[in-house]
Amino acid sequence: MQRFASRHPIWTLVIAIVVAALLWLVFAPWPDGLEDAIGRKRIFLNAVFGGITLGALYFLVAAGFTLIFGLMRNVNLAHGSLYLLGGYVGFEISDSTGSWLLAFPVVFVLVAALGLLMQNQVFRRMEGEDLRQTLVTIGISVVLADLMLWIWGGQSYTILSPEWLSGPTTLPVISSIKSDGEIVYLRYPAVRIAILVAAIVMGVAMWLVLNRTRLGMLIRAGVDDREMLAASGVRIQYVFLAVFGFGAGLAGMGGIVGGTFQSLSPGEDTRFLLASLVVVIVGGMGSIPGAAIGALVIGLSEQLGLVYAPTYSVVFTFLIMALVLAFRPQGLLGDRR
Amino acid sequence: MKKYFLGAVAAAALFAPQAMAQDTIKLGILVALEGAFAAGGADGVRNVELAISQAGGMAGGKKIEFVVAPSDTTPDTAVRQARKLIEQDGVDIIIGPLSGSEGIALRDYAKTIPEKTVINGVSGALETTWVDPAPNFFRFNPDGAQWGYGLGSYVVNEKGWKRVATVAADYSFGYTNFLGFAVDFCKAGGDIVERFWVPLGSSDFGGVIAALPDDVDAIYLGVGGTDAINFLNQYEQAGTETNLIGGTIMADQTVLTSKGRAKDALIGTPTSGWLAEDNDSPEWTSYVKAYQDAFPESERFPSPSLFGVGYYIATTAAIAALNEIGGDLSGGQAKLHAALSSLEHKTPLGVISLNENRQATGTIMINEVVEDGQGGLRNALVGKAEGVTQTLGMSAEDFRAMGLPSRDTPDCAALRG
């Protein structure tokens, strides 16, 4: 952080100003002139919060994707299928047991097991052959998509959020001040706040594991130099298995989250695969903080775009990706190799 | 010599499909099987199978074959698939497409294949048969604007909802279906306070839901498929409670049969469209029974969807016209074109005839979503608008003067007059 600040004083200033402006926009009551210019504060706040929660979902899905890529150089194009499968299984579990929370550990274990199976039975057999692995993942995603269509059919599924998370909650953020001086606080769907908190907890936990534990040390060493790590006596296959299983399980849990505040249907798998790819390209391949920043940027651009420039909102995501590729091809937080 | 030989081979290759087509008639089914309308598209294919099997697999004394070409609701894919049907599969008649922008693209493509026939599946863009129509493009379903007609005066007169905000999909069908609602609604004295247009395939509507004004009687929703389910899910989670008015694809079977509670926000929502599930005319009930008997319950909707009915009527129209001309497709299918233009087509939804633009005139049903008593939802018929024409009861000049459907057309204040 300090090193970045001393090396890029101008960029640090720009980032600080943008962050300060955002904080002011979120917390301060807006003057009338601003409301006339870009509409009511409630709309802006909802778009920002919507963007952040959408980013949280993208982060859950893309984090596993980027870890797997960083460690194994394996672009797992079946990642979206794991997302959708997790969502469908989560629907079945929460529908039959009535417990939304129970679905998370069960789905994590089931989808992680599938991930372990894929790594151990398929990708291990073609280690180091990036192109072949990528093609095989496409094949697996097609097969999984058809199997899911067979089992769950073409209709849409939404997962019911639990009673204590349904409906809106009031946030301590001022939405507007009425003419009689009464302060109106922002009301926002409770389930989205829960998802946001969960994603932040997951992100921090992953960062801690990566930076403070022995396993994290192995993973980081593997990302930097796989051969050297294997040569120094580490059973690298176990590290691969752990990472693949964890990444797959995370995508599965992302499916439950997506099924709760969006919906599940055939085609969502490729949509989320594409979103993960964009997030990872923007954030930097193999970097967890990069995935977090990429997910936030993409989520915010989608939501702010939808509200303020609906015609062009579809373009923004790809415009950002193109800009990143043009000026910083390794991604915002990626390493140049 | 070699040149002549090559020429002969090329000619033989060119004429091969036609030679085969003499004892069979090949239909190309262009249908969206990916994207927001995938479930509806699959129902379209089921209904084509039903129509062909009801005809005993024969039309005009010839055997019917069909090829399914999947599209993804984008016009470029639709044209690519249509071209594949004509050039590679050698089909005689294309039935399709499903969505609005695809329809416009197919109208233009149809002009390049004047010796073939395109019968619209269920796409509803007004422009397809209104602006520079293709002579070999026939549409037996009312267009999107017609589907929306009748709902506006119903909500003003019966419900007393006069101020609405609208959220609709930002593409041609969204504009067109909204136009039909708005023309009628504004003429009946309603006012549209604010219009939101959302891209097709949006999955997160949180920002739009927050931007909806509070001081309106109802919100008109012109989205469909998974977009509609996502919207309703997020609408309930945001705790918003205003009356809803649905566009034609808002309360279709694809939405009503979705799993989860999101669709419950729709209870009490009036919609308009071409169908009424509890329509008690004998043609409709016998068609629904045939549909239910033809497919196991797990592989179909409880009753045919709008998309399914569209493809059914298009296919039966093709078969009826082929029977009339004895399957004679010679002379660039001229006889088939004439027979389709003058066909008094008896359908499960009554007799449908085409106007000079080869566009259907039909009856529009007003439905309301109610609980069916078994934990599901269904549409209950509450009203009808008979004989809705392509120009929505206006003269062609007035209709043309209003402008083509777009984000800002129609101008509500001007219509209220």
Image (spheres, coloured by chain):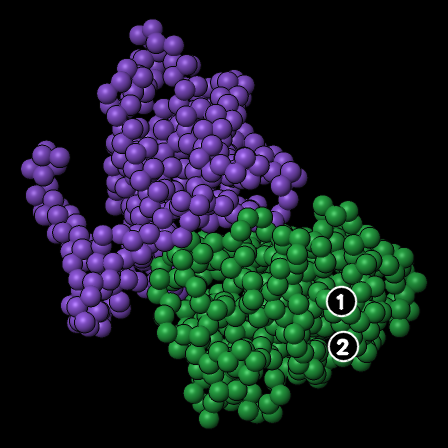
Chain colours: A purple, B green
Chain of the residue that carries numbered disc 1 in the rendered image: B
- Relative image position of residue A10 (x, y in whole percent): 9, 47
Which residue is found at the position 39% from the left and 65% from the top?
Answer: A311
Which residue is found at the position 19% from the left and 58% from the top?
Answer: A25
Q: Nearer the viewer, residue A50 or B85?
A: A50
Residue sitting at the far top: A233
Left or right? Give the position of A30 relative to A144.
Answer: left
For marks 1 and 2, the one nearer the N-term is 1
Which residue matches tag 2? Answer: B352
Position of B247 relative to A222 (above/below): below
Chain of the residue that carries numbered disc 2 in the rendered image: B
- Relative image position of residue A20 (x, y in whole percent): 14, 51
Secondary structure type for disc 1: helix
Secondary structure type for disc 2: strand
Q: Amino acid at mark 1?
A: Ile
> Which numbered marker is on residue B313?
1
Position of B52 relative to B164 (above/below): above
Location of residue B336 by image quarter = bottom right
**Can residue A42 be seen from the camera position used here?**
yes
Left or right? Give the position of B248 relative to A14.
Answer: right
Location of residue B263 by image quarter = bottom right
Residue sitting at the far right: B61
Left or right? Give the position of B33 relative to A335.
Answer: right
> Which numbered marker is on residue A137?
none
Q: Amino acid at mark 2?
A: Ile
Left or right? Give the position of A329 relative to B394.
Answer: left
